[in-house]
Amino acid sequence: MALSDQLLLDTLEPTARLSAGRRQELAALCFLEKVTQNIDPLRMNVSKSAQAIYLVKGDLGIRFVNQSKVILRGGSPAAKHPLNQDAKIKDTIALTDIEILRIDMDLLDIMMTWDQLSQGEMRQQRTASEDHHARTTADWMHDTSVFSVEKLQKGVFSRLPAANIEAMFKRMTRITTTAGQTIIQQGMEGDYYYLIERGTVIVSKVHDFTRPPEVVAELEAGNAFGEEALASDNKRSATVTMKTDGELLRLNKTDFVELLKAPLITQVKWLDAERMVAEGAVWVDVRLPSEYTFDHIRGAINLPVGDIRQHADTLDKTKTYLVYCQTGRRSSAAAFILAQRGFDVLVLAGGTRARG
């Protein structure tokens, strides 16, 4: 069953070191489990992910590889730490009926990394700033409504080195916006990557200049925009307008390429891509339907880069996707968009021109 009382997390390590918001999130994502006497709880993990297991109630016998034995009691100082963190444990047995708490270790590590980075940033900024009422980078890093653990676990930040995340925060600037304000204009050069801290934006496109713009998306706090033109080095493909007052965080193009694009976009050569397809990877042609119809790689699906946000949910996140266009430019933009949404995606180096 899901953990209903987050106070338990206040007594364990390292969960007690998480910020209050992160502990509240974690409480909804970890599980209490009852184990009957004479069962080894370490043998019961049916999940594919590594888990930290805590003894909450009852007595557990532990045998080590050197055949020595100890008894661990729920609520004791030793039980504050994961019982399976010691590699020398050979097996365990429930001496009484017990309760254990399971926490996904990758999930916990992401939370700890994010919190530690933000706490370090907070100490530095609060010391340096004379305005103690100003909202700092660390403040919004702690804001779980903007950067929920789901976004951190599956979005763009989950795939970045911690050093890049920290550098990105330091280089970002905040702008206050008003309803109706145009942030990005279709057809203009790309200059910034944006994160929405507060407010809602409307994304619209002009397909036919004799008709009004078409609204293609509405984005809220925690969403990002502006990456397509920066990743592909093309002009803006849509207009973004504030629907409400708000605050945006923006990163300039040079920093975006260095800190976000380069680590996220992995290129693969043609022969390696063919091997990956034979093993189950899927080709994605991100050009226009007319280009796809005229000439596409056999077995490829067509998902134009301009439509990829709307149709990303139709893709299977258990698969690897190999995106391509004619040169690699549009496919780089598509790869970044998909990577932000947690997909395993690679770019065909050189595009279709590179096919032998």
Image: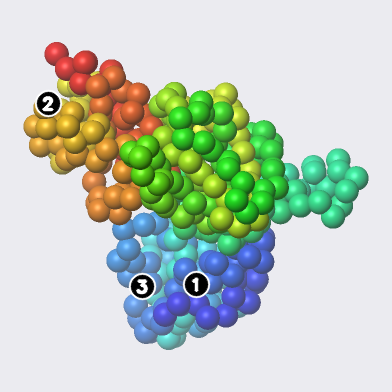
> Which dot, 1 or 3, sits closer to the camera?
1
Residue 108 image position (x, y, % from top left): 52, 57
Provide the secondary structure element on which disc 2 rests. loop
Residue under label 3, please give it.
40
> Against 106, is 39 above or below?
below
Residue 142 vs residue 321: left or right? right
Residue located at (47% from left, 65% from top):
103
> Which dot, 2 or 3, sits closer to the camera?
2
Residue located at (76% from left, 52% from top):
135
Residue under label 1, please give it.
28
Q: N-terminal of the two: label 1 or label 3?
A: 1
Is the residue under label 3 in contact with that under label 1 (CB below 8 Å)?
A: no
Callout 2 amino acid: Asp
Q: Which residue is farthest right?
A: 130
> Against 18, is 288 above or below?
above
| 3D distance between C-alphas at marks 2 and 3 | 58 Å
So how many labels did they put on this image? Answer: 3
Is the residue under label 3 in contact with that under label 2 (CB below 8 Å)?
A: no
Residue 179 vs residue 84: left or right? right
Callout 3 amino acid: Asp
Q: N-terminal of the two: label 2 or label 3?
A: 3
Residue 106 image position (x, y, % from top left): 46, 53
Provide the secondary structure element on which disc 1 rests. loop
Q: N-terminal of the two: label 2 or label 1?
A: 1
Residue under label 2, please give it.
295
